[in-house]
Every structure is written in C-alpha cells, then in structure tokens.
Amino acid sequence: MTPLRNDRFLRALARQPVDRTPIWIMRQAGRYLPEYRATRARAGNFMALCQNPELACEVTLQPLDRFALDAAILFSDILTIPDAMGLGLSFAEGEGPRFAHPIRSKADIDRLGVLDPEAELHYVPAAVRTIREALDGRVPLIGFSGSPWTLVTYMVEGGTSKSFSRAKGLLYSDPDAAHRLLTVVADSVTAYLNAQVAAGAQALMIFDTWGGVLNPALYREFSLAYMQRIVEGLVREADGRAVPIVLFTKGGGTWLEDMAATGCDGVGLDWTTDISTARQRVGDRVALQGNLDPCTLYAPAERIRDEVAKVLAGFGSRPGHVFNLGHGIHPDIDPAHVQVLVDAVHELSTPYHTGS
Amino acid sequence: MTPLRNDRFLRALARQPVDRTPIWIMRQAGRYLPEYRATRARAGNFMALCQNPELACEVTLQPLDRFALDAAILFSDILTIPDAMGLGLSFAEGEGPRFAHPIRSKADIDRLGVLDPEAELHYVPAAVRTIREALDGRVPLIGFSGSPWTLVTYMVEGGTSKSFSRAKGLLYSDPDAAHRLLTVVADSVTAYLNAQVAAGAQALMIFDTWGGVLNPALYREFSLAYMQRIVEGLVREADGRAVPIVLFTKGGGTWLEDMAATGCDGVGLDWTTDISTARQRVGDRVALQGNLDPCTLYAPAERIRDEVAKVLAGFGSRPGHVFNLGHGIHPDIDPAHVQVLVDAVHELSTPYHTGS
C-alpha cells in the first residue's frame, strides 16, 4: 500500500502531536455539494449509489477535491446491515428510510443470523478497496457502522420515529428478546467493521444516533454495552498501524466517561456539550471529535471563524482533538461556508500546536 | 374561592413536607383516553377544542375522574400565542402544527406587538375560570406557556422541524433580529401567564421543548435568558398563596444549575438525567419534577412499579419532588398502565415521607 501522506487524523486519535488540528465533516460527501447531487442523479437513487463501488468512490472523493480535509469517510448508509438481513430497505423521496419487513415478533428475531459481510454485503468492502486505491495515500479512510441500538430502532420501528415507542417498548416489555436481537446485530456489526478494515479502512466510527433517547440505565444496558462488545471484537491494527475507533452517541453528553471507558480511541461530541467541559471529564483517556453546531454554517464568515475559535480554545493545546461538526452537515449549506470553516480550523489551530 | 382540599403539589414545589409524593402527568388530558377522543370528535378539531372553554374544561377534568392525580393542567396548546399574533395556526391530521404566515423577514418581526391576552386570547383565561370553578378545590390548576425560544422555532420554521435550520440560522446570522423577536414573544408570554393567574391558575409551567437543540452558549443567551425575563415579570402570588413556576427544557439535563438560578420554584427533568444526580446538582434551591421515561408505560405492571421505585429512591426523602413523566404520555398507552403508575407513586412514596 502507498504510504499515508497526511496522518494528522490518525495521530490526533492516538493523542500524538500534530502541526494543526485535523478536520473532517460528518456527511462531507453529501447533498450540499452540487457534484454529489449530479452523481446521485446518475446512480438513479440513494441505495444504487451506495451499492456501486465506483460511484461510491467518486462521491467519497468529491469533498477532498474541494477542501483540505484530513480524512475521507466511506460513502454508505448505516442501514445496509438490516437490509442485508432481509428487512427490505427503501428510501421514499423526502421521507427517510422504510423497511418492508420490520421486526415485530420473537419469531422475527429468531430468524436473524449473524451476517457474513463479504458474502452478503460484498459491495461495501468492494467500495472500501476502490476508495482506498483511489485515495492513494492522500488521507486516511474511515469505515463506519450504526450502533446496534440505533440499527435496532429502525429494524423495530420500520423507519424513523419521534417517540421510539416500539423499540423502547421492547426494552421495557421484553428485555430478553431485546438482548437477543442486539447480540445478533452487534456481532454482525463487528464482522462488518472487521471486513472494512480487511478491505483497507484505516479508522472506524460507530454512529449511535439514537442512544440519546434512552435513560441512563437503558443506555448502558442496551446501547453502550453492545458498542463495548464490538470494540472488544475488532481487529485494531492493519498494515502495522493502529486502527482507531471513535464512538459517537448523539445526545450522549452526560455519558462521556462511560463511553471513554469502553476501550475506544475517540469519543464524538454533539454541539450541546462544551468541549472544554468534555475534555475535563474524559481527561487524556480518549481523543475528542467535534463539536461545532452544524447551524453555525448558516452564519457569515466572521461568525463562523469566531465559533471555530471558541471550539479550538475550549479544547486547548493538548493533543487529541479532531475537529468536526456536532452532527452531519445540512443539505442547504453553501459550500463556500465550508471553505471558511476548513480554512479557519487550519489557520486558527496552528498556534495550539506550536512546538509540537 | 373554595379552599384547596389537596395541596400536595403546591407544598412539594415549596419544598414543604407532604404525606406522599404528588403526581401529575404531562398530557394527562389526551389521546390515550377514549373519553378525550370522544370530546375531541364532538369539538370537530383540536383548535376548536382549545377555543371552547366548556369542552376544554371537560377534557381537563377527565383524567382526574379516572386517577388520583394531584394537579390539573389547563387544556390548551403552546401555539396559541403565535396564532393570536396572526401567524395562522392549523393542524393537519397526523402532521403537526403549520403556520400559514411564518416569520421570514425583519419586517415580519417588526410587525409583531406584545399581546393583550384578555383581548386577543380571551378563550384561554375563560377556560381557566371555567376549570377553576369546576375543580371546586379538588386539586390545584396549572397554567402554562411554551418558552419564547420554543415558540420562535415554530414561528420561524412554520411548523415542526428536525434540524431547526431556519430558527438556529437566525440566531447565528442575525442575533439582533432574533433578540427583538424573542423580546416581543417573552413579554407576550409574561402577559399571557399573568392573565392565567388572574383567571385562577395556581401554578405555572413553561415548556421549553426545543431548548435542548441549542449549544450551551446559545441556550443561555436565547432560551434561558428569556425564561428568566418571564420569571421576573410574573405575579408570584394569588389568593394569599404563592404561585410557583416550573421550567422544563427537554434535553436540558446539562443546564439544570442555570435553570435553578433563574428564580423559578421547580425544574422539570426529562428521563435522560438520573434524578439522583439532578438533585445533587441543584441541591435544595428548587423542587424537581419528573422523570419517568414515558415508554416505561409499555411495560407490564411489575416493571412499571420497579421503575417508579427507582425514581423515588433516586430523589430520596427530602421534600421537593413532584412525580411526572419525563415527557408527555404517548397516545397509545393503555390507561390501565397509568392506574398502575399513579397507585405505585402514592404507595411507594409514603415511606419517604414518614414523620413529615
């Protein structure tokens, strides 16, 4: 493999010194870019784009061609796993994901088996291989998955939800069945992420989009415990280099210490927690990734720079910060504002790394 | 006025001893009750129900006739204020609220004036008077409003939102205009709540449903500051008795100390914060209201009792706890499970108040 020419992102996750704070952006390959919309139109629909390694590679690289980002992230969707399990994923325009065969009974749960990603989700490792080759050492490639709990919410609800009545109802009314379901999903996620690493992913991220809808006890029992199970089952090295893993629970600001104790390398922060407070709470155990409010990018350039400066000052000068938004970039953001953001992070972070 | 026969709720908010922990339930008058659905059908639609004092009174009292609840809450909607300001509220079935004339420019903001509730929202104080008379001293009546920030999200977005791009975008791109808008809304809320007290409301609650989507700095500047402005402008006594005010920011678990410092009497907790942690953090400065996960009510009776026991044990034996869910009750909850909840709170809380 070509040697990595920009390893700021991996160094920051290893809490090693860097020359400036690395930045990548959740959903950096996405609808706010006209070139993404053009490729998606060519693909026909969103899942066709995910399932075509050449096109997935094309959109993965698009933001890197515009902005000096320090990492690429595999273009895919968190719902590939339940789709491969036979739940029948579709996306109605403007309506979010739908499963034709949601989990509605114990029999539905007992029918599920642990996924073999190379056999049943071949297009994902194939995309990783294609992207890794196309990157040719520019920046590291991040692989990812949804958290077991987050996947289970979609599998049980049949789509997005406001109250999560069915999924949370299952935790309260039949915790044993919930544990069986989460176990098979977690073991599938472990196999899926290991397949991504085998195919060339150099870092991993788990998106726990819906962990924050649980109370503290349920979060630990039904979301965090399964992310820990995955962390413990991952191959943590490839090509002689550590493969770091970042956990991100949206709305999980009160559980950062618990997340840091799983053995992960980094914890993602949404924008509702001050990064200075977060850093005090987790100390040097893990790196932190985040946490600019995505809506900051609606502001004029000067305000964006001010908000970037606040996040950088909040983290301070120790190693271990990966700059990011606190959630995915909104589709109506002007790409020129992303340019302001990336430039501001690189320029304003340099003084924090002087002498390193 | 008839003397109050059950003042547990008011005593708990005043951090005074009670014989058992009082309970009421957010959205206790609502769709989970067949008798509510029948009255609503008679009214024709949701806003017609809110605007008819006799029918609003009828649904307000329905849950009290079923369950030994310790407070009634005015049946109304948080969006009455922007509707009275001319934004044109409607509810499409299953779609949530819509404003025909959302706030989209500075001119739209400058056109708004502080509301005169008795003139422009006469049906609300009229409902309060009708309900207060019908209650005849059974339990205290809670009046309420949405927080200024929460109302502004709907006014600017034109309805519900997932990302709050427009409303948060306004805070970042034109904070001066946002402050002008929030000021006129906050002063309208103050007048509205004072009109409810004048009409007979014995306690007040402010629902900050969307404060939790802000980062800490924006929350303090654009949501909390305006709730504090309201608290400072309220009439805090009626009929020779204190009228307590409870603030509830959904997703505001990290800001409890700030909320407690506004001068309010109680802070509402959603289910994502342990009430034991919350109590340690706010000490005896305020009462706490909450915080059972609404999805607990999908569980069998024994599990509901266990979860009630955990919340009661988490708060412990000092005065100052009002039991509630951490959010509104879901429409598909079995009323028999609510009976289990209310019985459990009364029975299991008694030991914590022995000797008081």
Image (cartoon, coloured by chain):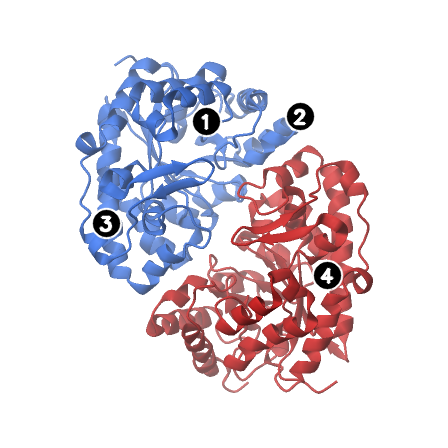
Chain colours: A red, B blue
The answer for how far apart the CA atoms under marks 2 and 3 are is 48 Å
Q: How far apart, in angstroms, are the residues tagged by discs 1 and 4?
A: 44 Å
Pointer 1: residues within 10 angstroms few (<14), some, or many (20+)?
Answer: many
Give the spatial CA distance, label 1 vs label 2: 25 Å
Helix, strand, or loop for circle 4?
Answer: helix
For the residues bearing labels 1 and 2, Cβ distance under 8 angstroms: no
Q: Position of residue B113 (x, y in %)?
A: 17, 45
Please give left or right for residue B135 compared with residue A320 in the image: left
Disc 4 residue type (three-letter): Val
Q: Residue at x 48, y 58 (%)?
A: A273
Give the image quarter of residue B99. Answer: top left
Q: Which element carries disc 3, helix, strand or loop? A: helix
* Sequence-first disc among 2 and 3: 3
1 vs 3, front mark: 1
| Amino acid at the residue labelled 3 | Thr
Screen quadrant of the N terminus of chain A: bottom right
Q: Amino acid at mark 2?
A: Glu
Q: Which residue is mark 3?
A: B183
- Secondary structure found at label 1: loop
**Do the residues at discs 1 and 4 belong to one chain?**
no
Q: Residue at x 57, y 23 (%)?
A: B344
- Measured along the vertical axis of the image, is residue A306 above or below residue B149? below
